[in-house]
Image: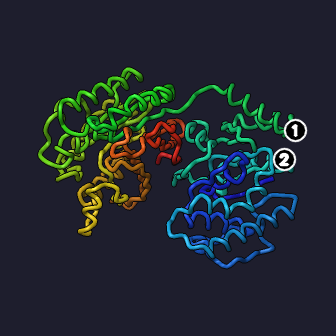
Amino acid sequence: MGYHFKIEHANVVAYLSSASSTQPPRLTVRELRSFLGALRWKKWPSRARDTSCCVPYELDSSAPTNLISSSSEWVSKIHDAADRAMTKIDRAEHSEDLIPAVSTANYLSELRPLFNQYTFFAMPVSATRANPELKAFCEYAAYSSGPHGLILIPDDFASDQGLRVLDPFPGLGLVAENPQKWPGILFWSNSGNTIFTSLRDAYAVYSELLQVGFEQDQLDRSLQKFRTTERYDGPATILQLSDLHFGTPEALELEPYLLTRLQSISKSIKRVVITGDLFNAPKRPEALAFNRFRNSLNREWGQDAVVIPGNHDQKWMGNFGSPIGELANLDWSSLVVDDNIGCVFFCFDSSRDADLARGTINPQQRLDVALLFDTQCLARPEIKDYLRIALIHHHPFTFETGKETLVARGLERFGITDEYFLRMDDADSFLQWCAARNVGLILHGHKHVPRYVQKQLVRTDGSVFVLTSVGCGTSLGAEGKPLSYNTLGWNRSNRQWTVSFFADPGDGGGFSRQQVSLRHAD
């Protein structure tokens, strides 16, 4: 069997197809409407209609269905179940953009048994339209699997535009950790066994599944065998930490826990970057605590972590006074070239010339970094093809957060948000500089909230450049926030990169993958 779907619906499709998943993914009202709207039509709605996904239900009996099945009854049941779920949503009033998990599970309750009745599933990862071999494999598997398997075929995978998924199912975690295998096939069983393999190896995996006759126990053993015998040839993985705030009680308490976690994933990490607020105040004891932590990281990975300063590293309480204290002793560089992973880090001090806790990067600082890069390229032209990453402390795209702190609640009485004191001034100039310099990825911290933003910028020559900003939360749980870190997977051969966001509630409950974002470098 086969099912053509939009790639942004991958996570909800995975939930429907897995009997082991108990919690549905976080979905907005719009995302769930989009998914159900596509299911209940026999062809994709037009782009104009699809923006709202609230159009009247119409069936075009002459149009091909998105479901590949010899059972017209199965197809009809799915259409009807999707229609009833949409009716439930229309009648409900959701005060928040994100639908409560219990409501999502209710809306999808009729669809789930129709999807997870199969013993195994497969999903291509890459654009099937642009890859005839991938499309051929999917069609072959859809027809040959009969009533045993469901092949989930994305309508398209525009990886140059990116994909962002909240609460990714384990299979998408494998995809994020292995961009070097793209284009590839993600296989998983009804019981939850999952592997992600390159298209080259997919036929061998599927051939064995055919031989065992898709019997559940045999199928699980086969998938497990392929997963344990795979060679590790993973991508260059960059670990992003931020807002450690050494000198706070949280940092003192949680440092051993974070280090233990990082040591457990150390084999996959090739470089560590820390995007500011290394200590809570520019005082010697706080700086010594950070240096001890940094030395632990350097010993673990055998190289220096790439660091940049934040406002707390040079201003009292992060707000007051000119740069003072330990900043002069902080060992950091404006440009770091890593030949092992094929990346260039453009490093900025966004607090240097800004008032209060705000940020800015003035033209002189941008010019200095550009000169360093151009000088390196004159000596070594191959650097021009490296992935270009900007490290800054402040967020380049402004946003509001919850009124969780006493200061934020006090400001609200006067109609002011803390963004006024925390924003990055003249961010547009910096973003245009990044577009002109082909710096497609910005890593930042500052607000203690993980964040992913992707924007299209128009360069001065009229060309369009896609820029992605990735924010890390506080890695040592400052202000009682969850412990956070991000991993960036980068594969030079196919220029694919992925970002995974991890968080722990701060009570030792364990780090879990909160988001996955997949993109192709321009």
Q: Position of residue 42 (x, y in %)?
A: 75, 68
The answer to whether residue 204 of the structure is visible from this angle is: no
Please say if 461 is above or below 95: above
Disc 2 crowd, CA 10 A, few/some/many (<14, 14-19, 20+): some
Q: Say which of 222 and 63 sits in front.
A: 222
Sequence-first disc among 2 and 1: 2
Residue 58 visible in this rendered orientation of the protein:
yes
The residue depicted at 42 percent of the width and 51 percent of the height is 451
> In this view of the protein, which residue sits in the foreground, 104 or 326?
104
Disc number at residue 148?
Answer: 2
Instruction: Depth check: give the residue in front, 121 or 512.
Output: 512
User: Answer yes or no: do the residues labelled 2 and 1 have beta carbons within 8 Å?
Assistant: yes
Report the side of 349 relative to 18 (left or right).
left
Q: Which amino acid does label 2 sit on?
A: His
Q: Quadrant of residue 302?
A: top left
The amino acid beneath tag 1 is: Gly
Q: Position of residue 353 (x, y in %)?
A: 17, 49
Q: Is residue 96 left or right of residue 326?
A: right
For mark 1, what is the residue?
213
SS class, disc 2: loop
**In the image, 114: left or right of 290?**
right
Q: How far apart are marks 2 and 1 (CA)?
A: 9 Å
